[in-house]
Image: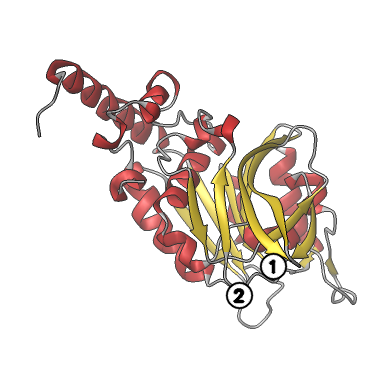
Amino acid sequence: MKARYPFRLILVSLSLLFALSLGAADAKKARILFMIGENEYRTDESLPKFAKEQLEPLGFESIFVHASKDDPNHFPGLEQLKDANVLFLSVRRRTLSGEQMEMIKAHFKAGKAVIAIRTSSHAFGLRKGEPPAGHVEWKEFDKEVLGHDYENHFGNKSGTDIATIPHSIRDPLMTGVKITSFHSSSTLYKARNLAGNSRVLLRGVTMDKGEPQLEPVALYRTYGKSKVFYTSLGHIDDFKLAPFNRMLVNAVYWAAHRPIPGSGAQASLQHSKERDKFDMSIAGNEKV
């Protein structure tokens, strides 16, 4: 392949490699605790694989805390959260003991970040009934922390078409996401009444009763001093999608207060003719 501007390409590629090496070095002390407790989307499989393939090569440390097989409302090892920089949440309708719920709330009181996917919009609230004795709910977690009201989902079993919001194309969290639309196997969640400080990155569209329905599917905000990233994506097949993986990697950097490789001055490369010639991170290896 002939390069029209070989000297320029060499400089650009070197600058990208330098940015990535700095990002990896910065990430070495960042600890991500994955809290997993849901039985629908197999995130007990997809998230360890994601961490091993996408995060660990960048220097992030991953800790996994799974719901107990004997008690789905108990998460052995959750006390390690006090030493983590970021809580990565994939939980569905679990009511924690008062002690463990306080661990979650202490994480936010300390100004630490959360990345939440899919069913985490209803992580700590029951659909009906009361929690077991000694256990508590956090019914308003979606509204209070994630910045929206979860109002169930559409019945679109054929999946959801996802597109980047125009204003988000140059957002640092979308750095290196070169495909601006893709298809997810996930049904579309209804995320309503967004908080005023929520910034939407992706929207999903489906048809319902003959009418197109649009909902935000990825957003970020702050809750107190805590950084918050949420996406209603998270189906096991979503982890096969390079744009989804790259966005999650970016979210981890952002949540851990680390510079996102390729963002800032380098972000303009996403929109240049040369952008597809370079991979800006491990997640870019599939040509996002």
Quadrant hosting residue 124: bottom right
Left-right relation of 12 to 283: left
Vertical arrangement, residue 267 with respect to residue 239, above or below: above
In the rendered image, residue 276, in percent from the top left (x then y), is placed at 29, 37
Mark 2 vs mark 1: in front: 2
Q: Are marks 2 and 1 in contact (CB under 8 Å)?
A: yes
Identify the residue at horizontal 16%, vertical 22% (top origin).
10
Q: Quadrant of the N terminus?
A: top left
Front residue of 156 and 70: 156
- Neighbour class for label 1 at 10 Å: few (<14), some, many (≥20)? many
Amino acid on which disc 2 is placed:
Glu
The numbered mark at residue 40 is 2
Point 13% across, 20% down: residue? 6
Q: Is residue 196 visible?
A: yes
In the drawing, does residue 232 fall left or right of residue 105?
Answer: left
Whether residue 111 can be seen here = no
Residue positioned 59% across, 30% down in the render: 167
Tag 1: amino acid: Arg
Q: Secondary structure at mark 2?
A: loop
The spot of residue 7 in percent (x, y) is 14, 16
Q: Is residue 178 above or below residue 170?
A: below
Q: Position of residue 53 (x, y in %)?
A: 34, 55
Q: Which residue is mark 1?
A: 92
